[in-house]
Image: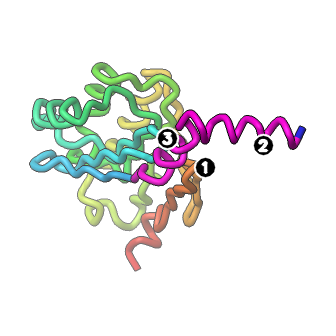
Amino acid sequence: VQDEINNKLDEMAENGTLAEIVTAYITKKLKVHYIRESGACYVVELPNGKNLLFDTGLAESWANIQTAIEGLGITKFDYAVISHTHADHTGNIQNFINNFDMTGCIWYIGMKPDFTNHADDFGEPESWYDDTIDLLQTNGITPIVPSDNVVINIDSLYDVDFRFLNTDPVKAES
């Protein structure tokens, strides 16, 4: 078996495919794009070719957001993270679902704020969180609510992790 592997590697070295594979591996980069004047909307291109959407921006900024992402050549998202449910972070959830390939996309959302003693401190009505969950579920999406300090490997080939910190709104205050 080892001889077969060595012969195949020799063949790939001779015809240049081994160099192409190594070069592609070495030159791949993680790219983060912030879409200006959007509220909060970031696109992360992973070295393995997958894409992560971080927040969806303000609804009134949709044309700008869509144009910017299409300009990057991105048509599909594999991961989506909603940091919290302010309108400038969630305003285009439905637009992304309607206009981009979200097939198999894994959605993450921050924990529901504890409004018991802080109803006004979070700057959002209590219904915003539930409304966001309802919107996702109406579209057949069950978001994952990660615990604090959870690490998710989103690109095992290039060892790219996404760590969720201060997901508990009460902890985030301190």
Asked whether 13 or 65 is in front, the reply is 13
The picture quadrant where one finds residue 43 is top left
Q: Which residues are magenta?
A: 2-29
Which image quadrant is residue 8 in? top right
Q: Nearer the viewer, mark 3 or mark 2?
A: 2
Query: Amino acid under label 2?
Result: Asn
Q: Earlier in the sequence, mark 2 or mark 1?
A: 2
Which residue is under mark 3? 20
Q: Does 73 sit left or right of 37 as displayed?
A: right
Query: What's the residue at 15%, 45% (across, down)?
Result: 38
Q: Position of residue 165 (x, y in %)?
A: 48, 66
The amino acid type, in three-letter code, at marker 3 is Glu
Camera-side residue of 148 and 9: 9
* Relative vertical location of residue 104 with respect to residue 6 in this rendering, above or below: above
Kindly give the residue lying farthest to the bottom in the view shown.
Answer: 174
The residue that disc 2 covers is 6
Spot occupied by residue 112 in the image (x, y as percentages of width and height): 45, 52
Q: Which residue is mark 1?
A: 156
Q: Residues within 10 Å of mark 1 (few under 14, many from 20)?
A: few
Q: Is label 1 in a helix, a strand or a loop?
A: loop
**Secondary element at image label 2:** helix
Q: Residue 166 in the image: x percent, y percent?
A: 46, 67
